Image: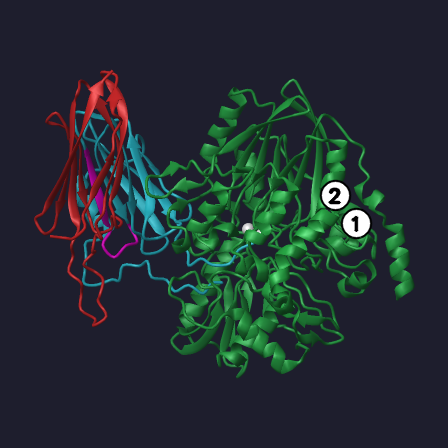
Amino acid sequence: GASAIFVAGLPKIGAAATGDDLIAEFTGGAEVGEGDLKLVAPEIAENGNTVPIEVSSGSAAEILVLAMGNPTPSVATFKFGKLAASRAASTRIRLAGTQDVVAIAKLEDGSFVKASSTVKVTIGGCGG
Amino acid sequence: MASGVKPRVKVPKSAAAGEAITIKTLISHKMESGQRKDSDGNIIPRSIINRFTCDFNGENVVDVELAPAISTNPYFEFEALVPEAGEFKFTWYDDDGSVYETSKKIAIG
Amino acid sequence: GNWARLAAQQALTQDKLLEFDTFGNVSLIHITDIHAQLKPIYFREPEINIGVGDNKGVVPHVTGADFRKLYGINDGSPSAYVLSYEDFSALAKTYGRVGGLDRVATVINSIRSERPDALLLDGGDTWHGSYTCYHTEGQDMVNVMNALKPDAMTFHWEFTLGSDRVNEIVEGLPFAALGQNIFDAEWDEPTELFPPYKFYESGGVKIAVIGQAFPYMPIANPGWMFPEYSFGIRDERMQEMVNEVRSKGAELVVCLSHNGFDVDKQMAGTVEGIDVILSGHTHDALPEPVLVGETIIVASGSNGKFVSRVDLNVQNGRMMGFRHKLIPIFSDVITPDKSITALIDEQRAPYLDALTEVIGKTGDDQLLYRRGNFNGTWDDLICDALISERDADIALSPGVRWGPSILPGQDITREDIWNVTSMTYGEAYRTEMTGEFLHIVLEDVADNLFNPNPYYQQGGDMVRVGGLGYRIDVTKPQGSRITDMTLLKTGEKIDPSKTYQVAGWASVNEDTEGPAIWDVVEAHIAKQGVISLDPNNSVKVVGA
Ligand SMILES: [Mn+2]
Ligand SMILES: [Mn+2]
């Protein structure tokens, strides 16, 4: 039944930088296009407290990941070193409800690209 | 120092010179977000792993900055180039100043 | 009357039910969603089964007279009885009970006598749903199913036994436990215990069976009971597995799925190269396979009521044709297999006194059934029990699709109560919820059912409510489907900021407290004696 009480959320306290603030800080206000960046996330989170995501790009030097609907949207920043065999990484994140997860990559040529994916976080229960 | 912190990594034992390998890492850590309250209504202070790095023979593979939205027991998966035999060094940096390290040797062949 | 019953059953013979012109070179036997129903039962199919988006008005979202018309089924016929809800109580008296694994065994044996190497594939939801299954932690079902000698199985409710118990049983299974989407949650890797596929040789054809477990297990059921596992649809990996088995020489690719029907349709349109999907979870019973591209999808009902037989002609690595029959298990017509009857009775013997104790009975006009998108009389009764026994304003009952029906004037035994309530997290909680939160709950469940993208559908029905009325527009997006929420006892509108006493059961949260739902329902039925419910008109549905 829809009897679960939602506990995965991070309660909102104080004023935090918004996702857009964090993007502006990362890009220095540069234009963000679309292109060499892929973000893979599940349609529905099995557990809002541990949602698997994967970012990948052919030429990213750095990738910023944000959970736009969390009270504090910061998630992680990946920097790829000389011995990274690919500009790709996976991790698990907390989502305080259904929202867009956004990745912004700084490519080697200095340009910025964006990818996003909506993840549904549900109360759950019931079944056939 | 956070208690019971235990790093684990999965690295192949050997690779061909120049091969790309997949590495997976986990560290047991509660990643206290600093936004939860205890039963008395007091905020539980933030205590997270805030940075993770992987290097091979002194050269960097990945360097990750973590925020409280990274799940309990932080997990990372990425790919590394193995130019020669040597050692991967993994380092996790805790808010409380603790540094957790582990390493894995890899052979060529 | 008795004469009509005998006449109807004489017309209906075992030979006729099993009649099948053996075809091609391969036979598949599919059974799914038995929900631990070892013995014959009654099972009324849904009256309301709304499809949304591309699935509006197409099977399995067609019921009653429209369904009969679609398949040319006569009113009052045996097929009408087993496949639709119309005149259910009357037809049940004529045609009798359905199911029973000893009857299923007879059907399987008959198919095997014509096709000795026919594959028997179990779609899961097998080790869940009865008093004996609960008390033996699934062992009764394992013992009986093992005797039927399946070739492979996939999973859903099994995991609610807890991962330790599931692992223990699966380690000892004499057949394959398949699930290409069952992953180790910690390292995100496939598991050894649940391989993605298995090869079989049948009729000279190399067959690959790929398993697909229920994708949303940790959402629809308590994930804390099996934290080591992760699921998901993983259709990209499904494609990889299909490619892998084809490259290893598979001439026929069968997917044994617990996705649910609409998810299977979408997956069939996304993944190339699956010949047959044997579909489970949404409990649909379809007299013909549905074709998506070159994939056929077979739906075989639930609760032991049907067995599907699919014969295929496979030549040079290609499926050239098929012949299919959805075989209804009329319990009074199909002779039980004696050895399986004995085995079933052996499982039940230690519990027989408890099982057969009569708790109450239904009134002369009172049918108890569950299936349907919104409410069923069984859940109306369960909600009544929650409100009165737990002293609540509002009751919530999960929209599960299992649970047999009880005819008017029939005794209700303890076994009957467990058949509609048994689960490993059946605590009947009582809690306070704000009107706003109740709205969030209804919207959340409604989106799991009516999201136009099947990959967001979890395959249950709408949460059942007692003491609460509402209006639902199934065409709207999440957050705006549910309006006009009303507290029935006063007629007042639900106030988002006000707090209500809510009782429910089957919470997916760990540490949920309360008496067992079967005890709550039993106490209520015992007090009522004869069950007679008011018609439930509290949900107004629009946009269907
Ligand atoms: Mn089922
Ligand atoms: Mn199911």
Residue C410 relative to residue C506: left or right = right
Q: Earlier in the sequence, mark 2 or mark 1?
A: 2
Is ligand 1 closer than 8 angstroms to the Cβ of mark 1? Answer: no
Write down the residue under mark 1: C334
Residue C145 relative to residue A25: left or right = right
Look at label 1 and name its amino acid.
Ile
Q: Can residue C466 be spotted in the picture?
A: no
**Residue at 20 percent of width and 24 percent of height:** B106
Q: What hue represents chain B?
A: red
Q: Which residues are magenta?
A: A68-79
**Residue at 77 percent of width and 65 percent of height:** C89
Position of residue C249 relative to residue C214, above or below, is above
- Counting from the top left corner in percent of width and height, residue A102 is at 30, 43
Q: Which chain is cyan?
A: A
Q: Nearer the viewer, residue A117 or C438?
A: C438
Image quarter hosting the C terminus of chain C: bottom right
Distance of label 2 from label 1 (alpha carbons): 8 Å
Residue B109 relative to residue C513: left or right = left
- Counting from the top left corner in percent of width and height, residue C211 is at 53, 37
Label at residue C107:
2
- Whether residues under marks 2 and 1 lie with C-beta atoms below 8 angstroms apart, the answer is yes
Label at residue B25:
none
